[in-house]
């Protein structure tokens, strides 16, 4: 329902959109989503890799392998799978833009966050650097954005008691907003 609601808002603003539900950690789901995109528009100009997150921060000795795998699939494997799928039509067109959302924790490691999340976000930065070099000859750019703390609904719930303390560590003395990243 939420996805269809967003599509209706986009269409009411005069643009075309479709809603596709997919597990971006699944190669089959990603391939099908990109097939439907190509079927609808016949081209792909821009990909924004924005799926991700984590559910809890635990010490390494308590981090389960299944949780590690799930968070890396959600945050890093998804970037690989979607970028791989996007490269085909972008190379064909000789043009494309790939933007992946990483995190400041992937650059510095100093933000209080989950080990598997920080590792995945660091992986996005390395992946993007290499991808940029590989795709540049084809007219495709690849960049990563590494925001700090962003006041998403999840962050507001997870850190509601600690937000004043967290704000003290941020130069602007407040978390960022999603619109600022966009």
Image (cartoon, helix red, strand yellow):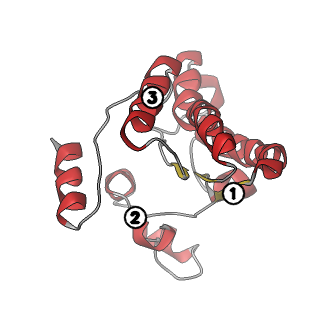
First-in-chain label (3 vs 2): 3
**Residue at (39% x, 55% y) in the render:** 155
Q: What residue appears at the point 55 percent right and 52 percent down from the top-left corner?
A: 45
51 sits left or right of 105 in the view? left
Nearest to the eye among marks 1 and 2: give it: 1
Residue 28 higher or lower than 16, as above or below: above
Query: Residue 92, position in %: x, y?
Result: 66, 40
* Marks 3 and 1, the one that precedes in the sequence: 3
Give the residue pinned by disc 2: 151
The picture quadrant where one finds residue 156 is bottom left
Image location of residue 83, percent across then percent down: 62, 38
Question: What count of labels does the image hold?
Answer: 3
Q: Nearer the viewer, mark 3 or mark 1?
A: 3
Is 153 or 162 nearer to us in this picture? Answer: 153
Res 63 seen here: no
* Mark 3: secondary structure: helix
Residue placed at 74% from the left, 57% from the top? 108
> Circle 1 sits on which residue?
143
Quadrant of the rendered image containing residue 105: bottom right
Quadrant of the image for the N terminus?
top left
Does dot 1 land on a helix, a strand or a loop?
strand
Decide: few, some or many residues near mark 1? Use Cα within 10 Å; few <14, some 14-19, many ≥20. Answer: some
Q: Nearer the viewer, residue 40 or 79?
A: 40
Residue 110 to residue 124: above or below: below
Q: Is residue 87 above or below residue 112?
A: above
In primary-sequence order, the first of circles 1 and 2 is: 1
- State yes or no: discs 3 and 1 in contact (Cβ < 8 Å): no
| Residue 155 visible (yes or no) | yes
Tell me, for residue 35, which label it has, or none: 3
> Which-is-in-front pick, marks 3 and 2?
3
Structural crowding at the residue carrying mark 2, measured as other residues with C-alpha within 10 Å and reported as few (<14), some (14–19) or many (≥20): some
């Amino acid at each position: 329902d939420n996805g269809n609601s967003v599509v209706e808002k986009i269409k009411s603003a005069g643009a075309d959109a479709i809603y596709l539900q997919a597990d971006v950690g699944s190669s089959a789901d990603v391939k099908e989503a990109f097939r439907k995109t190509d079927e609808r528009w016949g081209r792909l100009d821009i990909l924004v890799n924005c799926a991700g997150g984590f559910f809890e921060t635990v010490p390494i000795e308590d981090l389960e392998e299944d949780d590690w795998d799930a968070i890396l699939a959600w945050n890093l494997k998804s970037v690989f799978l979607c970028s791989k799928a996007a490269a085909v039509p972008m190379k064909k067109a000789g043009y494309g833009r790939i933007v992946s959302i990483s995190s400041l924790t992937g650059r510095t490691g100093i933000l209080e966050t989950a080990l598997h999340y920080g590792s995945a976000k660091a992986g996005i930065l390395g992946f993007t650097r290499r991808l940029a070099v590989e795709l540049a000859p084809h007219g495709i750019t690849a960049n990563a954005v590494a925001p700090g703390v962003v006041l998403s609904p999840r962050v507001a719930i997870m850190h509601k008691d600690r937000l004043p303390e967290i704000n003290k560590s941020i130069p602007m003395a407040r978390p960022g907003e999603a619109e600022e990243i966009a």
